[in-house]
Image: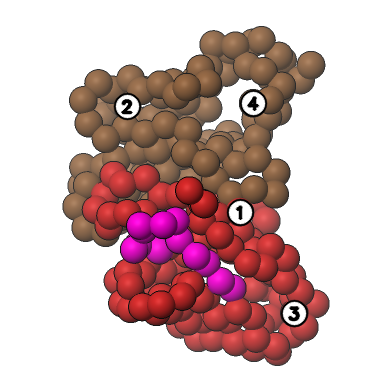
Chain colours: A brown, B red
């Protein structure tokens, strides 16, 4: 089975400052990794994913995450945040074999301060 | 292309009543997943279904909870004799494939409140 740890439950950051949201995973098999974002009273939206190839993956709105196998991490970063980035961010993992179930971390609430 | 549709958005039930949550996957998706989100917690996997089959129900409570995905119609998550601890947001997701790596598309959830 897989599990995900998001150590930071809340991250406040000033507008235009950089941010890093941490994610570590545990698995006995090779994994796929995802970041989802949840805005208030909405479902989760896929932000970016790592399946294979380059360990650095990017989203269309400036976020990026780097898969680090040796540290079993998949931290999410953005060099300059906007007010609109305020949301809950979930890291998730699924095994490369077997069913497509996603296992989620407990989430990090990013609050961008004007 | 409509996304994953869940209804109702909000559901209030008294203790002991039944709750029925519906999920229509995205067009062309035959794999459905149900997750529960408790306040201040992440999403917990409950059950994974493919048309007419339960593939993995390892996250389902042993009693009172059941799920189905019939050949025709939406997937249904049914909670019998609800208790206050069942109050949560229930999210449905779908994917076109069941293999790992196929991103899940989520609905906006059903927020169940048990009074």
Closest to the observer, B107 or B87: B107
Read off the residue under disc 1: B108
State which mark lies toward you, 2 or 1: 1
Read off the residue under disc 2: A67
Q: Mark 1 belongs to which subunit?
A: B
Q: Secondary structure at mark 4?
A: helix
**Most distant residue in the front direction:** B1
Q: Quadrant of residue A23?
A: top left
| Distance in Å between CA atoms under marks 1 and 3 | 19 Å
Closest to the observer, B67 or B88: B67
Residue A85 is tagged as: 4
The residue range painted magenta reads B21-32
Residue B111, visible in the rendered structure: no
In contact (CB < 8 Å): disc 3 and disc 4: no
Q: Mark 3 belongs to which subunit?
A: B
In the image, residue A113 sits, relative to residue B59, either above or below, namely above
The residue at the point 52 percent across, 52 percent down is B2
Q: Mark 2 belongs to which subunit?
A: A
Q: Left or right: where does residue B59 sit relative to residue A7?
A: left
Read off the residue under disc 3: B13
State which mark lies toward you, 4 or 1: 1
């Amino acid at each position: 089975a897989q599990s995900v740890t998001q150590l930071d439950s809340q991250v406040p950051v000033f507008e235009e400052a950089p941010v890093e949201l941490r994610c570590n995973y545990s698995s006995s098999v090779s994994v796929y990794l995802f970041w989802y974002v949840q805005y208030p009273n909405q479902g989760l939206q896929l932000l970016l994913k790592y399946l294979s190839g380059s360990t650095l993956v990017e989203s269309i709105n400036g976020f990026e995450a780097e898969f680090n196998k040796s540290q079993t991490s998949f931290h999410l970063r953005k060099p300059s945040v906007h007010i609109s980035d305020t949301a809950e961010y979930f890291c998730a993992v699924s095994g490369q074999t077997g069913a497509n179930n996603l296992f989620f971390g407990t989430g990090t609430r990013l609050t961008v301060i004007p | 292309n409509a996304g994953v549709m869940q209804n109702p958005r909000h559901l209030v039930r008294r203790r002991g009543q039944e709750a029925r949550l519906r999920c229509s996957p995205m067009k062309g998706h035959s794999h459905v997943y149900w997750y529960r989100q408790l306040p201040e917690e992440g999403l917990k996997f409950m059950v994974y279904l493919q048309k007419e089959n339960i593939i993995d129900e390892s996250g389902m409570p042993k009693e009172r909870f059941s799920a189905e995905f019939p050949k025709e119609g939406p997937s249904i998550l049914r909670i019998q004799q609800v208790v206050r601890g069942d109050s949560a947001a229930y999210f449905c997701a779908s994917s076109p494939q069941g293999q790992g790596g196929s991103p899940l598309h989520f609905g906006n959830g059903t927020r169940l409140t048990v009074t």
